[in-house]
Amino acid sequence: MELLRRLKPSSREASLALILLVAIGGTGLINPRFLTGDGTRDLFTSTAVVALLAIGIAPIVIMRHIDLSISSTVGLTAWVVADMCAKNPDFTWVQCFIIGPVIGIAVGILNGLLVAGLRLPSLVVTLGTLYIVRGVVYVVSNSVDYNAQEMPPSLLDLGQKIFFGLMPLTFLLVIIAMLIMGFFMKYTKSGRDAYAIGSNPPAADLVGIKVFRRTFLAFVFSGFMAGLAGVFYLMRFAQVDSTAFYGQELAVVAAVVIGGVTIAGGSGTVVGAVIGALLVQTIQGGLAALGVDAFWKAAINGLLLIVAIYADRVLARRSEQSLLAQRIRERV
């Protein structure tokens, strides 16, 4: 019974799952193909990169920070890995999964040192590294594109693997990462420290929590996941250019916040972040089926983000009022 209680999802996650099912059903009415095996596989495949990035930045947002450099890091990683594969025909998927995360970790270390070490605002720092990394992509790429012919066949074969008739390997790896991080955030001291830092950073310092180390490692982890997502990008699209994954940080942030990770810090789960990513991609799929212009799809992403932030504020106020009322009753 205790195990079942621990595994029971929170009301927020259960509500998100219900909304996701309604969105999938509504999209299926618009486009019946969406509810077929091919449609489900397409949803999982298109969500994999965003969901992986959402897992990466969820701990950062929980600690009251943000990482806007993730999409640029995906683009840089994808192009560098493709370039090295093109110049080294003997490369296999193993080298790709080593090179990608290493590049992402380098960006994460830079962000972590600036935010945790110098205590600079993460919004400003990662906005700066977003443009720096994107500039590096334009310089090193020199307008050179790569396609499937330059990719290692073993990597592309991995991207085509399907399990249980519905689950692409990329999304299966996302689920594994989600479960590992979910356990880490809930049951380890480092994970609980992240929530304490997000709830009250000055108090976390006073009680001896290693704020620098936790914050620095969170940005390194985000960079690692962004580097891994760059390899996932190649597995999905089998081509890359200097504009790869350009401007997609909004979709990732929207997925995390819609998934219940409050932008004010201190609450949320990686499970909710992945559900949020699925919800965002489902809505985008429904809009595409309706023939909605790309501009309006981006605008709707922004609207969903605002609604999610507003909902978080309403829930926070209700929670505060409920707690206050409980304390008053205890004193009476």
Image (cartoon, grey):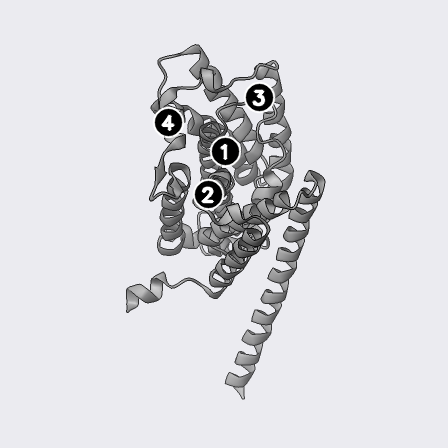
Q: Residues within 10 Å of mark 3 (few under 14, many from 20)?
A: many
Per the image, the residue denoted by label 1 is 108
Per the image, the residue denoted by label 3 is 241
Q: Is residue 210 left or right of residue 164?
A: right
Foreground label between 4 and 1: 4
Q: Earlier in the sequence, mark 4 or mark 1?
A: 1
Per the image, the residue denoted by label 2 is 44
Q: Could you tell me which residue is drawn at 47 percent across and 62 percent down? A: 14
- Quarter of the picture containing the N terminus is bottom left
Q: Residues within 10 Å of mark 4 (few under 14, many from 20)?
A: few
Q: Earlier in the sequence, mark 3 or mark 2?
A: 2
Per the image, the residue denoted by label 4 is 157
Q: Residues within 10 Å of mark 1 (few under 14, many from 20)?
A: many
For residue 317, above or below residue 77: below
Mark 3 touching mark 2, by CB under 8 A? no
- Cα separation between marks 2 and 4: 17 Å
Q: Earlier in the sequence, mark 2 or mark 4?
A: 2
User: Can residue 212 be seen from the camera position used here?
Assistant: no
- Cα separation between marks 4 and 1: 29 Å
Mark 3 touching mark 1, by CB under 8 A? no
Foreground label between 4 and 3: 4
Q: What percent of the width, then of the height, locates residue 54?
A: 50, 44
Q: What percent of the width, then of the height, locates residue 325?
A: 57, 80
Foreground label between 3 and 1: 3
**The residue under label 1 is which amino acid type?**
Gly
Mark 2 touching mark 1, by CB under 8 A? no
